[in-house]
Image (cartoon, helix red, strand yellow):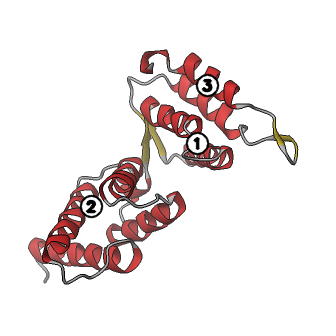
Amino acid sequence: MVNDFEKKKKRYQEIERVCREEWCISATTDVSKQTQYDSYISNIYKLLISNESRNEIFYYLWCLETEQMGLIGDATRIEGFIEKLSGIFSDPLMNRIKLKLIDLAQVFLDVIQKRISFEEASNWAFKMMDMDESGSLEFDRNENRSKIFEGLSFLSGVDLQTDPETYLHTMYNVEMKFKFLFEKFR
């Protein structure tokens, strides 16, 4: 019979393997880089065992790639990587997201600062609405759900076009909606 320590060790090793094969951490002989990579793996393991939401894990990986490692972030690749990690734990909680106003505000800011496209913001909003319909989306009881859904509704249509060259919404519309929804974040 496998004891708790062995289960944890096996999960850690599996996370380490997935990180090295599927993510941007590669094998290196540079001891300082290896120590740095090991700390990333350790932090990913801690996020997973503490049942952090996919959003929290995504944000950690995004910041790690773009700020610590100096790479260009790739949201689709990170989502795929998180999917592989969630398979290690096969815990239904791993597939739940706790959506907060600050998460929504960050997506608006990412659009305004041109870190993501209108299409990426729309895809994210639709994904959140689909997760809500399937019961996989959680909200903090202190959050204003109607404000969250107003923002999601806006973002889900932000990529609509009047013709192949012109979006229905302008950047000005996005900025005004952000100011309306998130006055406290200014």
Residue at mark 2: 44
**In this picture, is 54 found above or below 153?**
below
Closer to the eye: label 2 or 3: 3
Q: Between disc 3 and disc 1, whose residue precedes?
A: 1
What type is the residue that disc 2 sits on? Answer: Ile
The one nearer the camera, 164 or 101, is: 164
In this image, 136 relative to 169: left or right?
A: left
CA gap between label 1 and label 2 equals 28 Å
Tell me where residue 132 appears, x and y as whole percent.
56, 42
CA gap between label 3 and label 1 equals 12 Å
In this image, 113 relative to 117: left or right?
A: left
Q: Element type at marker 1? A: loop
Quarter of the image that includes the N terminus: bottom left
**In this picture, is 106 found above or below 150?**
below
What type is the residue that disc 1 sits on? Answer: Lys
Tell me where residue 66 appears, x and y as whole percent.
39, 54
The one nearer the camera, 90 or 151, is: 151
Tell me where residue 6 appears, x and y as whole percent.
12, 78
Residue at mark 1: 114
Circles 3 and 1, Cβ within 8 Å, touching? The answer is: no
Residue at mark 3: 175
Residue found at the far right of this picture: 163
What type is the residue that disc 3 sits on? Answer: Glu
Check residue 184 in the rendering and tell me which mark sits there, or answer none: none
Q: Between disc 1 and disc 2, whose residue precedes?
A: 2
Quarter of the image that includes the C terminus: top left
Q: Residues within 10 Å of mark 1 (few under 14, many from 20)?
A: few
Q: Residue at x 73, y 31 (%)?
A: 170
**In this picture, is 56 found above or below 27?**
above
